[in-house]
Amino acid sequence: MKESDMDELLNIETGGEQKGFHKSFHYHRYEPTPYEGLENLFAEYVLKSSDRVVDFGCGKGRLPFYVHHKFGASAAGVEMSEDFYEEAAANLQRYKGDKDRVEFQCCLAQEYDISSADNRFYFFNPFTVQIFMKVVNNILKSAEEHQREIDIILYYPSEDYIFYLGNSTPFEMMKEVGLGKQNENERFLVYRFNQTFD
């Protein structure tokens, strides 16, 4: 299936890349996760309709729409760019699925208020590890207040993210989904935290 075919099926427009660079080196340029990659990931990693996925740096909203379409899971996209947020909101108006199960927020990732329902968090290398650390800390605080199983999904994971999760957090890697490409970084890593607090 071509990229445009899935967009057409969902009645959204998520293709393209960011033109120009963000003025802060902490934020990386937008590029949507290829649908082929999402198909490979979710062939091995299954979501439930009760899951709520948060996509940090969601751009035009491809991942939230995809996981809702495939699994019926609810999803939130967090996007700091007003332009991309407006494109995601426009996609939501056109989306053929249940619009009440997908939402978008225009804010910095570290300022997103994590809901007790949020339990799956997706990152396609949207920002530096310094911001990633703040976001993960927010996730862990939420887990302390509302105990639940939490997964972090990384696509094209940076060594900094991997080192931080493996050495400074209670998350443990539970799954790697390679895409059979020549670039070994083109893979998904899934980390899980499922510890009860005293």
Image (cartoon, helix red, strand yellow):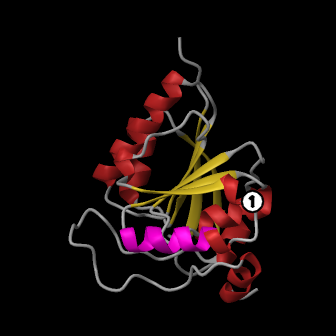
Taking the spot 39% from the left edge, 74% from the top edge, the residue there is 83
Q: Which residues lie in the magenta part? A: 82-92
Give the image location of residue 170, x and y in percent: 49, 32
| Left or right: 48 in relation to 3 | right
| Left or right: 66 in relation to 106 | right
Image height of 141 relative to 49, above or below: above
Image height of 47 relative to 139, above or below: below
Taking the spot 31% from the left edge, 59% from the top edge, the residue there is 128
**Pointer 1 local density, CA inside 10 Å: few below 14, some 14–19, many at least 20:** few
- Farthest residue to the top: give it: 198
Secondary element under disc 1, as helix, strand or loop, is loop
Q: Can residue 43 be seen by looking at this rendering? A: no
Q: Between residues 181 and 14, which one lies in front from this camera angle? A: 14
- Farthest residue to the front: give it: 93
Callout 1 amino acid: Asp
Give the image location of residue 194, x and y in percent: 61, 30
Which image quarter holds the N terminus? bottom right
Q: Can residue 142 be seen by looking at this rendering? A: yes
Mostly what secondary structure, the magenta segment? helix
Image height of 121 relative to 127, above or below: above
| Quadrant housing residue 108 | bottom left
Taking the spot 36% from the left edge, 75% from the top edge, the residue there is 29
Image height of 156 relative to 105, above or below: below
Q: How many marks?
A: 1
**Is 81 inside the magenta-drawn segment?**
no
Give the image location of residue 33, x and y in percent: 56, 73
Q: What residue is pinned by disc 1?
A: 98
| Quadrant housing residue 141 | top left
Taking the spot 61% from the left edge, 51% from the top edge, the residue there is 53
